[in-house]
Amino acid sequence: MRERLAAALLALLLCASPALAAPEPEAAVVDDETAVAEEDFETPGKDWVPGYQEVTGQAVNVSEGDLQATVVNGVLRPMRGYIPLEVTLYNPGSTPRAVSIRVESQRVGRSQVATRQVEVGPRQRLSAWIPVASTAQGGLVRVQSPGGSFRPFNFYSVDPTGQPMLVLGSEQTFESGTKLPRVKEKPKLSVRFIAPQDAPRELALYVGHPMVVVAGDVTALPADVWSALEAYASTGGYLILLRPPRDVVGRLPLLTQTPKGVVPYGFGRVRVCGKAEECGAALLADVNLMEEASLGHVGLVAPAGPPPSWERSFGNSHMLSDGQVALLPGVQAPVGRFLLLITLFVLAVGPGGLALARRKGPVALLIAVPSVALVTCLAIVAWSVLVEGFSIHASRYSLTWLDRDRDRALTASIGGYYANLEPEGVRLPAQAALLGPDLNWDEQAMEADWTNGMVVKGGFLPSRSYREWGEVAVLPSRARLTVRREGNALRVQNALGAPLAEGYVRLDGKLWDLPALADGAEGEASLAHASIGKVSFTWVVGFPEHVKSRFSRVPWDTLDAPLPEGGFAAKLEGAGQTPLSALPAELHEGMHFVHGRVDGP
């Protein structure tokens, strides 16, 4: 009995213990591991979650007397352009308060300064937006008011985990309009929510975001907010309407019919959503396309900046990043000529000075050496004055969509600038944005005031330095091209504000060649050659290769439609039609392409 019991216990132990059990065949274990490895290799994007994550920060509140101020730390940083930094002010008193806001962001030892002056009325809560360069990782906020000043705030920015998105509306409205879930890790979208009534009014605060969503009622947005959003879409942005209004065509004037899905809009795109599930899936599909096509960068123009400091320290001879060619030739300092003058100076005071001392004595040498040094310095100064001068040198290139129905111009421009002396400053309106290079923009110490548009007070163009700046703008414009019939001939009057070099116009089903005309001049168009077939805006644009690389983000495929009846595409010369064109400069080259509709007979 005892032996049978012992045998039964031994059998149970052998079955229960994996160490004592019979091992599985070795080949089966290897096959299982290989299968797991192959499965993980075939789905590299499996870790990403199809949802969104809200980028929230910690609110810092301070008060000075009656006035209260709040800054939220940890703001979402867009890929380029400007970080929208919100300073919320509340005045519970019965008298208005003037408030000055100054943001100092510093990196690599150089500071970017942005200021704004606002007035907070009695018992008013006001959101003041300060555009901060997207290269800033943090900085200091100083708020001052007559009679007192707040302690400085610290702020920092957060890099997005997924594709950055700005949402005007609540989280609940966004979820109901897209059916996208909120996730904790590895989201496809990094979202910042902004109350529609407090949304920014300037184009610069939207232009760096690849996508902007209006989650709520479009008709409830303030007029100036909607104007900035429409400018954002028409100058290369991607605007998404979760709840489109019935009069969407009236609110988006470049549309000719009620859109469905995503449609081109000027230089940008607009998505009009229908069902929530379909809209959410479409947004995720758009994000995937951006990632696959490496379109994470946004904006129509891409100015080139100086090479990184580590490249310069290793003796990189390229003047610009990625080895790009400058838009303005001959902007390097004349090192060779200066070295020649310095070599002549060394020979004069070296062997020449020794010979002079032997012949005339030490007194002559004491007189000759300072004299030769003075002549050398005067020669260098004379070269700078007579050859380079004190004016600004520039090359400017642009694309313009002329909206004659609303007398405005949608423009994207790039320019290269060089000056011996720094200009006093430049001014841009609210619906215009100044864009620096994607890289190393933080190496430029620039100061700007955003009280009424953008006023650059310093650092725009340091002396004896080459800089490239991009612009996107929606500006009022009376520019037009007028045509009229005279028998079988077609007369053309150039009122585009610049010399007309060449172009085409389609009228009465025929394609006409535009003559070269000075601004305000009139001439006769001729029928285009029969061999010329489809002519589109893209077909006319002929930038040099080093210039076209700066416009690589332009959606050329959406501009490749043939000219419609009454449409024209033209090449202009001169300074262009953007805010920086008012900057006095000696123009090396001006090349501008305009697309629009003629004022017909």
Image: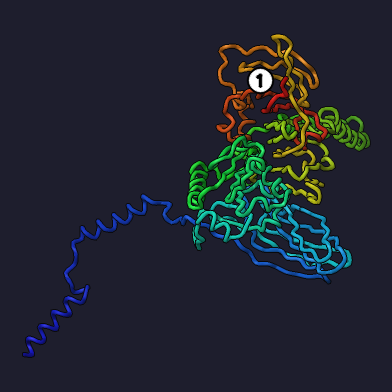
Image coords of residue 296 (percent x, y):
56, 45
Residue 319 lies, with reference to residue 480, above or below; the image says below
Q: How many marks can you see?
A: 1
Residue 210 seen by the camera: no
How is the structure coloured here?
Answer: rainbow
Asked whether 231 or 593 is in front, the reply is: 231
Q: Residue at x 59, y 40 (%)?
A: 269
211 displayed left or right of 478: left
**Where is residue 83 drawn, in percent x and y?**
67, 53
Question: Image point 50% across, 59% down: which residue?
Answer: 181
Q: Is residue 535 above or below residue 174?
A: above
Q: Secondary structure at mark 1?
A: strand
Q: Quadrant of the C terminus?
A: top right
For residue 417, side relative to residue 40 (left or right): right
Amino acid type assigned to the residue bearing label 1 in the image: Val
Q: Position of residue 495 (x, y in %)?
A: 78, 24
Q: Nearer the viewer, residue 267 or 398?
A: 267
Which quadrant holds the N terminus? bottom left
Residue under the point 80% across and 50% down:
449
**As drawn, which residue projects farthest toward the bottom?**
2
Which residue is at 67% across, 20% downward?
Answer: 503
Looking at the image, is 349 positioned above or below residue 231? above
Single out the residue that lies furthest toward the front: 246
Image coordinates for residue 82, horizontal then vertical, percent: 68, 50
- The residue nearer to you, when weighing 176 against 46, is 176
Q: Residue at label 1?
A: 505
Which is nearer the eye, 435 or 520? Answer: 520
Binning the other alpha carbons within 10 Å of mark 1 as few (below 14), some (14 to 19) or many (20 upward) gives: many
